[in-house]
Amino acid sequence: MIPVVRADEAWTIVTGPAHAGDAAVLAAIEDLQHEGRRFGMAFAHAESAPATRGPILVVGAPDRNPLTATLVREHEIDLKPIDHPQAFALRTLEPGGGRVLLVVGGSLVGDVYGMYWVWDRLRVHRRIPELNVLRTPALPYRLTGVRGTEQIRNALRYTATWVTGADIQSLDPWDTSDKPNRSRQRAAERIELAHRYHMKVFAGGDEIAYRPEVLARYNAQLDPADPALWNMLQDKYRRLFRTIPGLDGVQIRTGELTRISGAYRPFDIMHDLPVSDWSLERRYRTFLQKLHEVVVGEFDKIYFHRTWVVNTQEQHSDPDVYKRIFTRDVPSRNLYLSPYMSLGDRWYYQPYNPTFNQTPHKMFALLSTLDYHAHGGVNVFPSFPGQYHQGGLQSILRDPNHNLVGVHFGVPGTSGWDTSSLTGYTVYRLAWNPNEPLRTIARDFAAIHLGPDVADDVAEIILLSHQAYKDGIYIKPVAEAIRGNTLPHLRLTTFRVRGIPAIDQGREHIEWLADTMYAPSRGHEDEAIAHLDRGLAAAVSMEKRFEPLAGRIDDQMLAEQVGDGLTLTRWLVETNNAYVKTCYAYFQCRDARDGASRDGLRGALDTLRKARERFIAAPGFVYRLDGIDQLMRNAAVALDDLDRAEKALATAPTGRDIDALIVRQQQQHAKILADRQNEAVKVLEWRGRVDGRDLLHVRGKTIEIEHLQSDPIADPSANFTAELPAREVTVLVKDKQSQAVHPFLLEQPTKDNDHTAKIYLFDQPPGYGRWEIDLYYLDAHPKDVGLALPWQ
């Protein structure tokens, strides 16, 4: 139901001739009108002074709006010049005719940002409060990715100045035909809209992505020493800008080729051909120079370069490597560099990135979500990044000669109650004022989504989330001992298990726990547990603090979502707490081998079992507990008979043994397929891009992917040519393309597994790799073929 509009809340927005038809101005007016209706307010739009009295919002400096000039003159307003085009001043007046709010920007864009600050205040307070403020952005460039028109509109609301979205490969610079290209059409539509919103638009991609026929056309070799390869790369960008001249620049990353698909092939020019005499620094510097020559030198566009790579030893994280690359030989005009704010990826306990302020090259800080314990769509309580990101920005800006000019952040398509929205809103606020009190930002976010009545109380819960996640999920001595991923045991809802327990009985997992979690904690167990308990206390407090607030929130569905998220968060933290304590108790029991340590392990295991049950029963549970379950199995065996458990682990196959077993199986499959190809029945052709560990479950003419670790399979496709029989046959795997471990058969179809063949995919090294396999069967029992699995 739309509230009734009160007379004193019927506003008129008065713009000037300079604003006529401007898309961003009209968008801000439309957003004010939409938001106003929610709170019983009306906003009419006029291009001259209204005839009737009432509150008015006057937009524009005196040279853009005659009414502003009149008000300034009649009321002798000291309106100081605004020397930044994005800055704006808000001034509330109370003349005899009614309330007036002046919105005066340093340019038309400043007017728009001022209107959106009024819009934001309206969302926070559910009215327009008295506003007297001058706001100038500390960081004038703000880049976000967009995927559609609504996300471009939301980027405007967050005052993004640059947007990126179109994938360079999908735009297909090599195709010069007139055939329809939907990707180019969508890109053109987004460019047109973003330009109307006064934003610059970029296409992005990972390089070097090439097409084999194009490589041949240029007579190029996949070798950095080959000039033809660089000529091909440069020509690709000439074609891109000639095909889509509206692009303002490109966003490029190299050294981690994860987004290459379709007809394109990846060549990691930074790491492939390791025997080459070209150093990383020379390769990287040459890449930058060659791209800059075309993007900036020939087309006068912007070259935005992400320095990220999947390690902490190279240009992204090591200032010495960075400085050896970004010498004076790398031009700085129109070149912008973007590393993460953190040294590695985006996890708590990460040191801040040391490559800022090392050279004159202009830099953006990539400020991402701090939710490695979850992922988008998981209803844990939002993770507040304010403490970490604010500290990082302040540390960089403290240098009077800093080279930070912008932030690279994610703006959600639509704002909601989630980590992505909270992070985007927080970064938007910090980009304008890195010193803004975090409690104010948290309170405003809470007010926007849950209402001003509970905002102060919910803000305290938001601030507590930092402690709940940092202390309650991470293991302090472990995190501090790692240069890189500071949360090794949990990744995006998966408590990771190491090795292949179906083969090694948990040996590799236990050895990994000993090396990675227990060894760094030796002598620091009390400190680690104290932090874990403090994080758990914060999670419990968050849940309890919200209970009396839920009934005061108008949107009861959202109130229930928040409450459920707090419950899920509490049991995530409690289960993690019990997991780490059980890990400690397990190794202490193995070391001490006495009654007290056995009792300690028994108590810890019982606590973990109960927490695990409550966690699974929590609303919205989506987690995989593989690592926890494996420790529980090994701990239970140890409590039953420690000597037998130790012997079983000692005699279980090692990782090297398993590799040998797998290689032997692969060789046997290849030989049998060659020898008995006339008997083998082809069942399936499968392909996909794999990043981590996955199991393919093939039964009949169906296939299911069980994702185990890292990122899910991308672009999977399956073509069944026959049905896998519902009886015990011998399944054979033909490897057509894969990574180092290569696919292998973990389980043959049996009655016990409902005649399901399970094929194990383990992608190494990190980053998506192309996999392609065929599946066959022989109508015979594996023992008769000589392929009985040693571990089944």
Image (cartoon, helix red, strand yellow):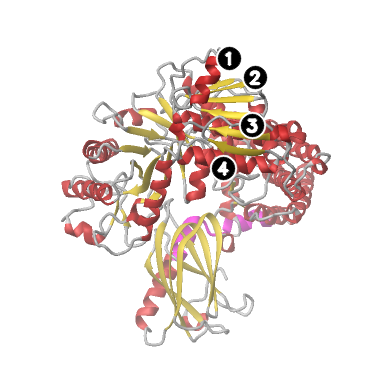
Residue 172 x, y percent position in the rendering? 30, 56
Q: Secondary structure at mark 2?
A: loop
Say which residue label 1 marks: 75
Tell whether position 602 is magenta. Answer: no
- CA separation, marks 2 and 4? 27 Å
Q: Which residues are magenta?
A: 644-662
Residue 102 x, y percent position in the rendering? 57, 24
- CA separation, marks 3 and 2? 14 Å
In the image, which is nearer the foreground, mark 3 or mark 2?
3
Q: Secondary structure at mark 1?
A: loop
Quick one: label 2 or label 4, which is nearer the N terminus? 4
Task: Identify the mark at residue 30; answer none if there is no mark.
Answer: 4
Question: Which of 727/621 is in front?
Answer: 621
Q: Is residue 137 visible?
A: no
Quick one: label 1 or label 3, which is nearer the N terminus? 3
The answer to whether residue 548 is above or below residue 68 is below
Q: Secondary structure at mark 3?
A: loop
Counting other residues with Cα less than 10 Å from the Cα at mark 1, is it few (<14), some (14-19), or many (20 or more)? few
Amino acid type of the residue tagged 3 in the rendering: Thr
- CA separation, marks 4 and 1? 30 Å
Say which residue label 3 marks: 52
Counting other residues with Cα less than 10 Å from the Cα at mark 4, is it few (<14), some (14-19), or many (20 or more)? some
Amino acid type of the residue tagged 2 in the rendering: Pro
Quick one: label 4 or label 1, which is nearer the N terminus? 4
- CA separation, marks 1 and 2? 8 Å
Amino acid type of the residue tagged 4 in the rendering: Glu
Q: Looking at the image, which residue is at 46% across and 19% down?
A: 82
